[in-house]
Amino acid sequence: MFRISLDSLLILDAIDRCGTFAGAGVELHKVPSTISYTVGKLEQDLGVQVFERQGPKVTLTGAGKELLKEGRYLLKAAEDLEHRVRRVACGWETELAIGMDSIFSPTALIAEITEFYKVANLTRLRFSEEALSGSWEALMDRRVDLLVAAAGAGPSGGGYSAEIIGATKFVFAVSPQHPLAAIDKPLGKAELYQYKAIAVSDSVRKMQPRTVGLIFGQDTLTLPDMRNKYEFQLAGVGFGFLPEPLARNAIEKGLLVEKQVEEPRQPEPLYLAWRSGEVGAGLKWWIEKMKAPDLMERLWRDVIR
């Protein structure tokens, strides 16, 4: 049994703000005797003095100040919980988790996030980064509620809804200093096998990891995301396919050289996906916003700026 109740904390807060038991009683619509009894019972139960009494005026003791300081956090949490319960009853989620492909950043969605908080300020947003098949696994394992720009097709078996919101073209690129840059013909396995490939790590935990564009037995440096892969290829550490929007400026500036390969990587669709039958008001809001015609342009612009 807890010795501190929310009702007693509410009374302490009112007394501190009003300066007197009588003033707190007026604010809380309680008779002064109820206020006095609650404070006295709290002090008795805790075995500490909460207020210094000087006639009608009262001031908090050191213990009282600490109790009220921490107690106000509890009052705020209880108030938030009440609001969240009411919003859930109206169809709004208490928390919404959004997973994004690791190349993209939530900073591209600042306008949408700001707008969302104006209509659903009590729904917590949580963003996470995923890569390759890890995006789909996060959705199916309920670690995220919505995938934005998940690369590659989803797993078989259903249980989710998905819409294509764009496609990414890929280019094979190396640093001008890399030995492959000097070869004047489409690159095949014989040329590529001699050098280190740069790959992105799949963020899966349970599913089979996905690999793209690697030769069996290839010497490979695996990095956590596409942005790191890009930097290592700029530095000439290795080679690999890069999203064309990401590599374009570096190729135009001569920092990367685009090479033709015998087995080019095909454009890859980018998906918006969510679990079927679990669409709350917040998720519906985000699904509609993520279907904006300029979404992919803004996501890529944020990556390359």
Image: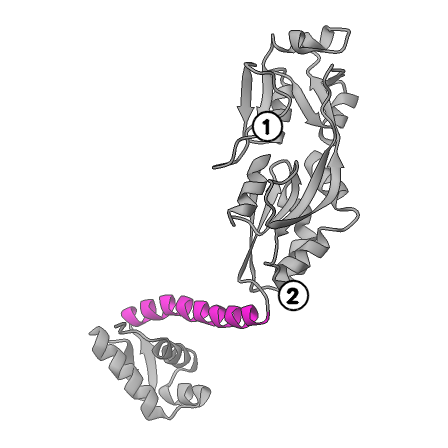
Point out residue 300 in the picture as x, y percentages from the top left corner.
72, 38
Above or below, 85 relative to 127: below
Q: Quadrant of the C terminus?
A: top right
Residue 245 visible here: yes
Residue pointed to by mark 2: 119
Please provide percent x and percent y for residue 96: 56, 56
Residue placed at 53% from the left, 62% from the top? 94
Q: Along the horizontal axis of the image, is 282 left or right of 206?
A: right
- In the rendered image, the quadrant that contains the N terminus is bottom left
Q: Quadrant of residue 304?
A: top right
- Image mark for residue 300: none
Is residue 227 shown left or right of residue 298? left
SS assignment for the magenta stretch, majority: helix
Residue range in magenta is 62-90
Q: Is residue 130 above or below residue 11?
A: above
**SS at circle 1:** helix
Please report the residue visible at 74 percent of the width from the left and 44 percent of the height from the top.
Answer: 165
Q: How is the image coloured?
A: one colour
> In the rendered structure, does residue 75 fall within the stretch colored magenta?
yes
- Which of 143/156 is in front? 156
**Residue closest to the eye, 93 or 173:** 93
Residue 155, by quadrant, is top right
Residue flagged by tag 1: what amino acid is it? Answer: Asn
Q: Residues within 10 Å of mark 2 (few under 14, many from 20)?
A: few
Percent coordinates x, y for residue 65 in the rendering: 33, 70
Q: Read off the residue under disc 1.
A: 228
